Image (tube, rainbow, N blue to C red):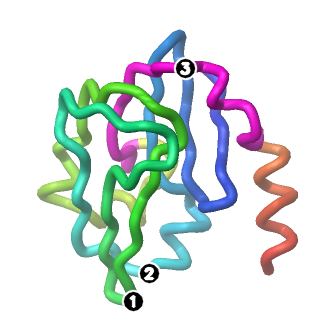
Amino acid sequence: MTTYYSEEHEWVTIEGNNGTVGITNYAQNALGDIVFIEVPEVGSSHAKGDEVAVVESVKAASEIFALIGGEVTAINEALEEDPALVNAQAETDGWFYKVALSNVQELEGLMDADGYKAFIATLD
């Protein structure tokens, strides 16, 4: 498993040709208490850069854009009952959806964990 990060504070963990997608701890901390999450439908297909989800917090609503293109194979149904799970475990149990990758080369340009840590260090 390898995890990649975007400058928009999203992550994707890759296993074979499948990915699990969510937002980072940095993002959930910036958003504050998350009160609602809209995830994509299972079976829907998205291109890299498409809006795929929405996160609403007490501070703001934010769109989540696809880091990689592909077909959504699963959603985290626990978020419907408990969106604050993202605040507690953003990079583990607070994942948003799983996707079958359409083009693994779309991962190029994303950061690894060390690159992301260096990136967020420039923001504080």
Q: Nearer the viewer, residue 108 or 23?
A: 108
Residue 61 location in percent, x, y?
A: 35, 78
Q: Nearer the viewer, mark 1 or mark 2?
A: 1
Secondary structure at badge 2 equals loop
Q: Which mark is residue 59?
A: 1
Which disc, if any, is residue 103?
3
Q: Residue at x 34, y 46 (%)?
A: 96
Q: Is residue 102 magenta?
A: yes
Amino acid type of the residue that numbered disc 2 sits on in the rendered structure: Gly
Magenta stretch: residue 98 in it?
yes
Question: Which mark sits nearer the N-terminus, 3 or 2?
Answer: 2
- Which residues are the magenta region? 93-112
Q: Which mark is residue 78?
A: none
The residue that appears at 82% across and 61% down in the rendered structure is: 119
| Amino acid type, mark 3 | Asn
Gap between marks 1 and 2, in whole Å? 6 Å
Question: Which amino acid lies under the numbered mark 1 shown in the image of this protein?
Answer: Lys
Q: Where residue 32 is drawn, which disc sits there? A: 2
Labels 3, 2: front one: 3
Rendered residue at 50%/40% (across/down): 48
Q: Nearer the viewer, mark 1 or mark 3?
A: 3
Q: Quadrant of residue 93?
A: top left
How many numbered dots are placed on residues in this image?
3
Looking at the image, residue 121 sits to the left or right of residue 42; the answer is right
Residues packed near mark 2 inside 10 Å, few (<14), some (14 to 19) or many (20 plus):
some
When the figure is inspected, residue 109 is found, relative to residue 39, above or below; the finding is: above
C-alpha separation, residue under disc 1 versus residue under disc 3: 35 Å
Viewport quadrant of the N terminus: top right
Quarter of the image where the C terminus is located = bottom right
Asked if the residues shown at circle 1 and circle 2 are in contact, with their CB atoms under 8 angstroms apart, the answer is yes
